[in-house]
Image (tube, rainbow, N blue to C red):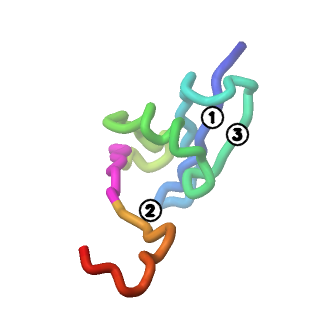
């Protein structure tokens, strides 16, 4: 058992910043931030990471979006 790693690219110097999570499969997998599983991103929410090259500090935040999808249309002529 180990950690899964998420790579973040610094906007200022293009350096790769890595942060680890135990929320995923923990099989030493590496993900780019945009491709990381939701479970890992939620685990990292609130974490801060610092770029070792330029010193920029980033805070990881996740949000939940509630939505509703129509699965089946009602029958026509319902008087309900």
Residue ID for mark 2: 12
Of the pair 63 and 28, the residue shown nearer to us: 63
For this view, does 32 lie left or right of residue 51?
A: right
Q: Mark 3 — residue?
A: 30
List the single residue furthest toward the top.
1
SS at circle 3 = strand
> Is residue 57 shown to the viewer in this render?
no
Residue located 62% across and 54% down the image: 35
Q: Position of residue 50 (x, y in %)?
A: 41, 39
Highlighted range, magenta: 59-66
Q: Which residue occupies 73% across, 27% down?
A: 28
Most foreground residue, 79 or 7: 79
In this rendering, which labeled residue sits more in front, label 2 or label 3?
3
Residue toward you, 63 or 2: 63
The CA distance from mark 1 to mark 3 is: 5 Å
Reply above or below: 55 against 28. below
Which residue, given by chain and number where applicable, does mark 1 sit on? Answer: 5
* Contact between labelled residues 3 and 1, with CB atoms less than 8 Å apart: yes
Q: Position of residue 69 (x, y in %)?
A: 43, 67
Q: Residues within 10 Å of mark 1 (few under 14, many from 20)?
A: many
Say above or below: 28 vs 75. above
């Amino acid at each position: 058992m180990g950690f899964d790693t998420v790579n973040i690219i610094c906007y200022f110097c293009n350096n790769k910043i890595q942060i680890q999570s135990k929320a995923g499969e923990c099989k030493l997998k590496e993900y780019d931030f945009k491709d990381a599983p939701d479970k890992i991103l939620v685990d990292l929410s609130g974490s801060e990471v610092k770029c070792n090259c330029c010193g920029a500090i980033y805070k990881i935040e996740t949000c939940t979006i509630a939505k509703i999808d129509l699965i089946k249309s009602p029958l026509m002529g319902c008087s309900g």
